[in-house]
Amino acid sequence: MYIIIGLGNPGKKYENTRHNMGFIAIDRLAEKHNIQVDKIKFKALVGDGRIAGQKVLLVKPQTYMNLSGESVREVANYYKVNTNDIIVIYDDLDLPLGHIRIRKSGSAGTHNGMKSVVYQLRSDQFPRIRIGIGGNGDEDIINYVIGGFKKEEVKILEDTVDNVVSAIECVISESLDIAMNRYNTKKRKVKEKNITSNNETEGKKTAKVDDE
């Protein structure tokens, strides 16, 4: 069984905001697989169903972001699942807009929802999918993350959420490693390295493009 948790804030005020990317991804996943996420349990809205033949529980904590871990802990304790079978989806201010990062484990970083989850589970050894919402520039961080999307962001993030859904399906039907290789956004960077030859001056540089 997989427990798939999207982080966000409940209420109309926060719908379709950057900080609710986890909720948005859960809603898209539920819609695609005809799962009703409408039962109130574990301080969350939950819904169970099957994806790729595997039983799943979709979870949207209703505690507000900073206390998300309370809901996650209740779910994990009730079902007694291995932490490897818990997948948490959330927004990331430090990732470029539309980028995806899937990881097997790791720290919570600066995300308060993830800090709460790690604290309540007493572990950071669980998979997570981070959705890049881009930097806030000169805008206040709180206003930025709970703000709505700009017109030019909408299509990018719709496509990103579709990729997150595909990544989750891949984790369940194939493996986490395959999903990481297939769906983690590649950043391209140019590295310069010195090359020398008998016919060229030492120190001449050539550009090499690598995937990161």
Image (tube, rainbow, N blue to C red):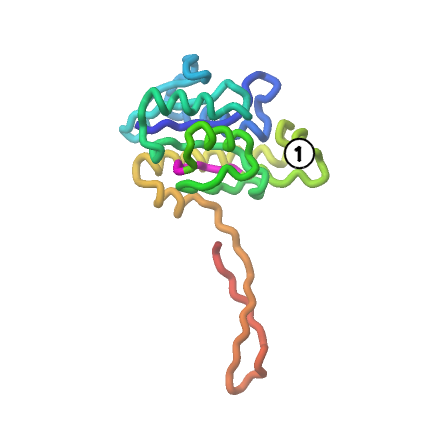
Residue at x 35% of width, y 37% of height: 171
| Kind of element beneath mark 1 | helix
Find residue 105 and report its image quarter. top left
Segment colored magenta:
125-131
Relative image position of residue 124 (x, y in whole percent): 43, 37
Residue situated in front as seen by the camera: 74 or 165? 74
| Residue 176, magenta (yes or no) | no
- In-front residue for pair 151/38: 38
Q: Position of residue 51 (x, y in %)?
A: 32, 28
Position of 108 with respect to 79 (left or right) is: right
| Percent x, y of residue 8 | 53, 25
Residue that mark 1 sits on: 141
The answer to whether residue 63 shows anywhere in this view is yes
| Label 1, residues with CA under 10 Å away: few <14, some 14-19, many ≥20 | few
Residue 28 at x, y percent in the picture: 45, 26
Residue at (40%, 32%) from the top-left corner?
87
Q: Amino acid at mark 1?
A: Ile
Asked if residue 79 is positioned above or below residue 188 in the image, the reply reads above
Residue 79, quarter of picture: top left
* In the image, residue 137 above or below residue 201: above
Q: Residue furthest right?
A: 138
Q: Is residue 6 above or below residue 98?
A: above
Q: Is residue 128 magenta?
A: yes
